[in-house]
Image: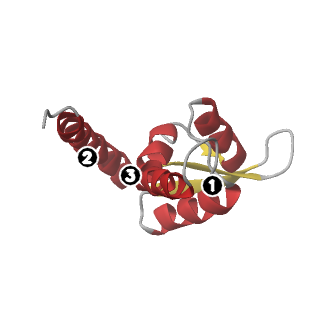
Amino acid sequence: MVEGRPEQTGKLEQDLRKGVLVLAVLSQLRAPQYGYSLRQALAERGMPIEEGTLYPLLRRLEGQGLLASEWRIDDGPPRRYYTLSPAGAESYRDLTAAWGSLTSVVAALLHEEN
């Protein structure tokens, strides 16, 4: 048991989080961010993400043409900044609409009387 919940529930919750990570990441890349600042922004909003999950996701999204990146050197070590590409901005809008519809349907399902 973890925090009073069966282990199975924790694994199921992790699966739910995986399904929304792309939308969460895209939501924070409307303005340029580097990996650590993105992790902080997500954690501050209640969506912590491990480095081992975030960086492969960023590379995959960039490979799919949804993100653009550039190296910058600003008063410190070089950092790779990511932002939405035009295709990423379009996907973000589409996924946001899909998320709104999905949450409405699931909310209705959860509140149905048997």
Q: Residue at x 38, y 52 (%)?
A: 88
**Front position in the image: 79 or 99:** 99
Quadrant the C terminus occupies? top left
Q: Select label 1 or label 3 by which is in front.
A: 3
**Front position in the image: 63 or 100:** 100
Q: Please give left or right for residue 54 compared with residue 108 in the image.
A: right
Q: Secondary structure at mark 2?
A: helix
Q: Secondary structure at mark 1?
A: strand
> Residue lying farthest right?
76
Residue 26 drawn at (x, y percent): 45, 46
Q: Secondary structure at mark 3?
A: helix
* Label of residue 103 in the image: none
* Label of residue 70 in the image: 1
- Number of numbered discs on residues: 3
**Residue at label 3?**
88
Q: Residue at x 57, y 56 (%)?
A: 7
Q: Select label 2 or label 3 by which is in front.
A: 2
113 lies above or below 3: above
Q: Earlier in the sequence, mark 2 or mark 3?
A: 3
Q: Residue at x 87, y 43 (%)?
A: 76
Q: Amino acid at mark 1?
A: Glu
* Label of residue 94 in the image: 2
Q: Amino acid at mark 2?
A: Asp
Residue 27 drawn at (x, y percent): 45, 39
